[in-house]
Image: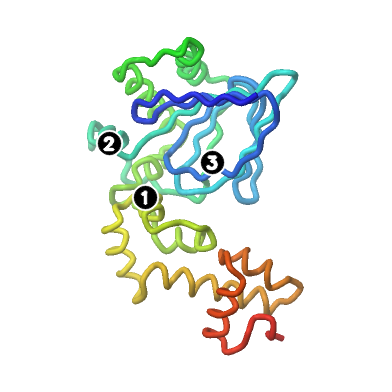
Amino acid sequence: MERLDVLDCHNAYIGSYFTDDRGCAHCCREHTLIYIYSGELEITDGNRKSRLKAGDCAFMRRDNRMWLQKRVCDGMPYHSIVLKFSKDFLREYYQSLSRRDIPRDARRDKHSLYIFPSGRNDVRGLFESILPYFEAGMKPTEEMLIQRLSEGVRMILDIDVNLYASLFDFVDPWKIDLMEFMERNYMHNLSMEEIAYFTGRSLASFKRDFKRYCDVTPQKWIIRRRLQAAHELIRRGGRKVSDVCLDVGFKNLSHFSKVYKEAYGVAPTMVI
């Protein structure tokens, strides 16, 4: 059995309920807090695996992709509550902060997943105060939801002062580095609008900022970077060309072969 409930004020809360094991790729479009009410969640973030059990909570940064494995545990179904933070809400929250309290030396690190210390009563209290609304099928007031969102932001910032740079990545000096993001994600099928959103920019500001780094369009840069990665993998040997094609982000083998030959003068199957 599967059930997904949404309290749609600010797209703030999602209740997820499964009575069997489920795995899924998760693309974080918004900064997210996830609380495990029962069952177990295994999160694969790059080469790191983290396991959350009942009572655990984690913060997932928005500019990433993870694999989520949801499991029944000790006979209890998987049941989680998710708190999402829209950019509009975070802008309003940021404007409410005293400039004296904003740590300008905060620095964004490479981690996309942060696990809360276990046993925090404020974390349990926040999420379990929401649970009755899901169970009763009631929508709380917008004021109540905004209050809970604000509590969630404060809890995230309490984990590590550097998370200011992650949550408020739409303001200088914490804007996401464009080229670092492109290097980490060129193989994924992201639209220009998605890349702009994930890097905390409008589409217009993304294109303007990208132009400062490159003399080609983002689309052409992605194709060129995929070809470079493919060329290196093929030269190393030991891999099928069709597998390399998919791994670097091309979806069509004939198109890949065509653009590869245009770039390197030979078909990928002829590289020695």
- Closest to the observer: 37 or 112? 37
Of tags 1 and 2, the one toward the viewer is 1
Q: CA gap, disc 1 to disc 3?
A: 19 Å
Instruction: Say few, some or many: other residues with alpha carbon within 10 Å of mark 1 (under 14 / 14 to 19 / 20 or more).
Output: some
| Residue in the foreground of this view, choosing between 151 and 119 | 151
User: Image quarter for residue 87?
Assistant: top left
Coordinates of residue 229 in the picture (x, y in percent): 58, 72
Callout 2: helix, strand or loop?
helix
Residue behind mark 1: 197
| Residue at 68% from the left image edge and 85% from the top image edge | 271
Q: Which mark is residue 264?
A: none
In the rendering, at what x and y percent does residue 196 appear? 36, 54
Q: Quadrant of the N terminus?
A: top right
Residue 79, image x and y in percent? 60, 22
CA gap, disc 3 and disc 2 = 22 Å
Number of other residues with Cα within 10 Å of mark 2, as a class: few under 14, some 14 to 19, many 20 or more: some
Q: Nearer the viewer, residue 66 or 188?
A: 188
Q: Is residue 223 above or below residue 204?
A: below
Residue 247 position (above or below residue 200): below
Mark 3, residue position:
113
Q: Tag 3, which secondary structure?
A: strand
Looking at the image, residue 174 sits to the left or right of residue 239; the answer is left
Q: Are marks 1 and 2 in contact (CB under 8 Å)?
A: no
Circle 3: residue type = Leu
> What kind of residue is marked 1?
Tyr
